[in-house]
Amino acid sequence: GENVEQHPSTLSVQEGDSAVIKCTYSDSASNYFPWYKQELGKRPQLIIDIRSNVGEKKDQRIAVTLNKTAKHFSLHITETQPEDSAVYFCAASGRTYKYIFGTGTRLKVLA
Amino acid sequence: DTAVSQTPKYLVTQMGNDKSIKCEQNLGHDTMYWYKQDSKKFLKIMFSYNNKELIINETVPNRFSPKSPDKAHLNLHINSLELGDSAVYFCASSQGSPGTNQPQHFGDGTRLSIL
């Protein structure tokens, strides 16, 4: 069945360093890959997304890369700040048009 | 203005009771969803409606019954609540028809606690 694996489950970085979160999906028909940030007690919020016809997308300090052949996609956060601390979820969506979420990565940015 | 609003925000009730959660979106979206987020933060789709029509119905106990009176509203009724139903339930909405894969916008969640 459809599955999205996400690693690492927790990630601690020093303020100013970069953070990378990786996801792997199983359904080759997946064509849309959003990333959500969820702060403690809050709702998931979309931070960036990418479609299968694009290999990379960037928005200020955040970038996402997609390798369709390997069925991998990654979130890159540069110059991390304490307010980047949150749980990040990747998701994949395709022929069934439902999001399959990864298990989340808890990012801690240490000041 | 809150784009996707859920009520109530918190719900504490006894095992065996029946309860409802309401969701409304003012984004003009055609598709709405219910998700369950458990204590380990895992987000799982439960249901989805497109223009009042059920399009996704995951393996959810039939004690859970969604209802969409119009495309701006999607409510969730839960019968005979069990301890394992304790979770945060999120409503979400997206534009367009199934298969267009548009961003989903989430509500603030309803934290359900079963005593």
Image (tube, coloured by chain):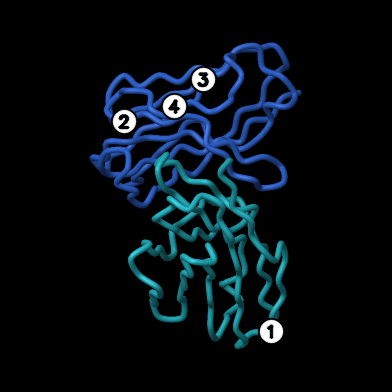
Q: In which quarter of the view is residue A47 placed?
A: bottom left
CA gap, disc 3 and disc 1: 44 Å
Write down the chain letter for disc 2. Answer: B
Report the side of B98 relative to A66 (left or right).
left
Question: Where does the image place residue A44, in percent across and percent down from the top left?
Answer: 51, 52
Q: Which label belongs to residue B66?
A: none
What amino acid type is highlighted by mark number 1?
Gln
CA gap, disc 1 and disc 2: 44 Å
The mark that comes first in sequence, 3 or 2, is: 3
Residue placed under numbered mark 4 in the picture = B22
What amino acid type is highlighted by mark number 4?
Lys
CA gap, disc 2 and disc 4: 17 Å
Q: Residues within 10 Å of mark 2 (few under 14, many from 20)?
A: many
In the image, residue B32 above or below residue A13: above
Question: Where does the image place residue A10, in percent across and percent down from the top left?
Answer: 72, 65
The lab-note entry on whether marks 4 and 1 share a chain reads: no
Q: How many marks?
A: 4
Q: Colour of chain A?
A: cyan
CA gap, disc 3 and disc 2: 20 Å
CA gap, disc 4 and disc 1: 41 Å
Q: Residue at x 51, y 54 (%)?
A: A91
What amino acid type is highlighted by mark number 3?
Ser
Q: Residue at x 61, y 36 (%)?
A: B111
Q: Which chain is blue?
A: B
Residue placed under numbered mark 2 in the picture = B50
Question: Where does the image place residue A90, in percent across and percent down from the top left?
Answer: 54, 58
Query: In terms of secondary structure, where does tag 2 sit?
Result: strand
